[in-house]
Amino acid sequence: MHQAPTAAGVDLVIDVPGTGAPVLLIGHTDTVWPLGTLEGDVPWSVDGDVVRGPGAYDMKAGIVVMLEALRALQPLPLDRRRAVRVVLVADEEIGSPESGPLLAERAHGAAAAIGFESPHPDGALKVGRRGSARVRLTVTGRAAHAALDPEHGISAVDELVDQLLRIREIVSDPGLPGPVLSNVGTIAGGARTNVVPAHAAAEIGLRFTDPATEAAVLRALSALTPVRDGAIVAVDVLSARPAWQASPDDAALLDRIAAVGDGLGQRITGRPAAGAGDTNLLGALGLPTVDGFGPRGGGAHAVDEHFLGSALRERIDLLRAVLTIPAV
């Protein structure tokens, strides 16, 4: 096991001996929940087949699938099981700004990649994902007394509002190659009502179906200019994942996994997903990739987050079979 410290935390890279080029198993150890959630709003609980807890569905259960399947493979001789490389990153929930650039290096020489994010609600795997970008729009104006000399001020908040309207026009432009999902996630600025605000900022989440749309939108955002004389507008891309459009190699990998599932009495299907993840980069690089190998459940990022214990066992059995030669 190799520990790779980053500014966001420690990534883990684990090479498990076996035969052939390694199958890459991708997951993340971070969650969206703050420290203390387990003792507070989202305690660990097991109610029949339903297991709850912060990050249980996204994606602690997926890590359990990896570990239990690999444990089950240990008694087999090396020529009966595939070589595996497990990569667990510490910053996926914020777009993998530290770990993302290292994924291509960690995937070098791999035969295929399997991501352990949650599946579609019906259990289908994810083959293809929208691209995503997190963008910070920062505006600098000039402070002044809002009543005595407002004409000497430049409102950063007013400028931010106008720029957000411009961005709305950019992302809804019918001339773009594909659709864009846009969400203004945070807004900050100003301090007192009697002071013209000198600073304001917003963070925006963007989703793209194709690389051409992503490039066009980010190019337009980088070209934004101030509406007000003297204002300064800056756009910074905090993180970005390319769109992953399913390839014939991805479909072939899905077919092989589905064939293994048939032998276990499991019906495995796959289709594209709206959300982005670390598999975006691998799929976009051309490595045969599927995602959504975690168990069925629901409530990701919400207080009712949960997974199904029965689905956990199904995924463990499936992964064990997939990694048993001559499966994948």
Image (spheres, grey):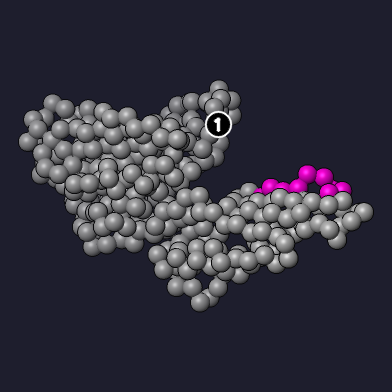
- The residue identified by callout 1 is 34
Q: Residue 189 in magenta?
A: yes
Residue at (11, 42) in percent of width and height = 20
Q: Secondary structure at mark 1?
A: loop
Left or right placement of residue 79 versus residue 290 in this view: left
Position in image of residue 312 (x %, y %): 33, 35
Residue at (16, 27) in percent of width and height = 74
Position in image of residue 140 (x %, y %): 69, 54
Q: Quadrant of residue 70?
A: top left
Can residue 270 be seen here? The reply is no
Left or right placement of residue 267 versus residue 194 in this view: left
Give the camera-side residue of 205 and 273: 205
Can residue 134 be seen here? The reply is yes
Residue at (56, 66) in percent of width and height = 223
Residue at (61, 70) in percent of width and height = 169
Q: Amino acid at mark 1?
A: Pro
Q: Could you classify mark 1 by the number of other residues whose Cα lies within 10 Å: few (under 14), some (14-19), or many (20 or more)? A: few
Residue reaching furthest right? 148
Does 228 appear above or below 273? Answer: below
Magenta region: 187-195
